[in-house]
Amino acid sequence: MAIESQPALRPTILVVEDEESLATLLHYNLEREGYAVGVSSDGEEALMLIDEKQPDLVILDWMLPSVSGIEVCRRLRQSTQTRNLPIIMLTARGEETDRIRGLDMGADDYVVKPFSMIELCARVRAVLRRIRPGLSEDKVRHGDLMIDRVAHRVKRGADDIRLGPTEFRLLDHFMQHPGRVFSREQLLDAVWGSDVYVETRTVDVHIGRLRRALNRDGQEDPIRTVRSAGYSLEV
Ligand code: CA
């Protein structure tokens, strides 16, 4: 099952677990925690889903029918696209050697079955906070910019900045990944959603609006245009 389209601000998690009752339980509890959740019972399918639309975190069972969790983890780490994708491994085996192997393969954390949902959710929050501080915080700061996701407010220095909803989501996306260059297609996927048909030049229009709002007093432009590549937030 693919991750459904959701409001841009909810972190997305892909659960890869072939044990149906556990997958359902994880799905239910993570959704209740406010995440957008997709589930796959198969390693090969999971790799395809991740290739189509990268989640913010993967919960990966060690023992899967075709491709093992550890192999999925290894392949994700080999690809430059997914090298830094946060992964929490699940295993029924609590042996120290497995734990070390899992972390060697690049998992960010490791949870031994049986575990409580409270514990797992705490690990998820911890990994997201560590790897993408911008994802789990209500307020994110970068340079003189501050975005408050709860109050839907943006400030530059002491000044309030008024943004439309699309410009707000664009800025939020940039502030989650300062310095990273996004193509127009990637911004469309992240901000508008991949199931919406919008022309790529629409991105330029909204970037223009975002810039005018942010730089209205002639400040330095925090958005960088990268020729033939896209846009990024200056670091
Ligand atoms: Ca399993």
Image: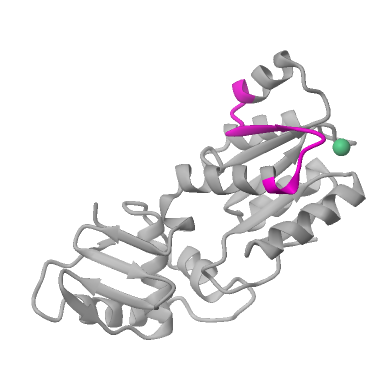
Which segment did they paint magenta?
103-118
Task: Please indicate, yes or no, whether residue 232 appears anywhere in the rendered image.
Answer: no
The answer to whether 43 appears left or right of 10 in the picture is: right
Q: Residue at x 19, y 63 (%)?
A: 144
Residue at 41% x, 56% y: name it. 134
Q: Is residue 166 above or below residue 23?
A: below
Residue 175 visible to an observer of this rendering = yes
- State which quadrant residue 208 falls in: bottom left
In the drawing, does residue 69 fall left or right of residue 167? right
Q: Where is residue 18 in the image (x, y as percent from the top left)?
A: 88, 44
Quadrant holding the N terminus: bottom right
Q: Nearer the viewer, residue 136 or 5?
A: 136
Q: Regarding ligand 1, which quadrant of the image does it lie in?
A: top right
Q: Residue drawn 53% across and 44% down?
A: 126
| Picture coordinates of residue 188, whole percent (x, y) | 50, 71
Q: Quadrant of residue 79?
A: top right
Question: In this rendering, would 190 be left or right of 162?
Answer: right
Could you say where residue 9 lies in the image, as x and y percent from the top left? Answer: 51, 68
Q: Is residue 76 magenta?
A: no
- Vertical placement of 25 versus 119: above or below? below
Magenta span contains residue 115: yes
Using the image as rendered, state which of residue 194 and residue 99 is in the foreground: 99
Farthest residue, direction top: 97
- Image check: 162 left or right of 2? left
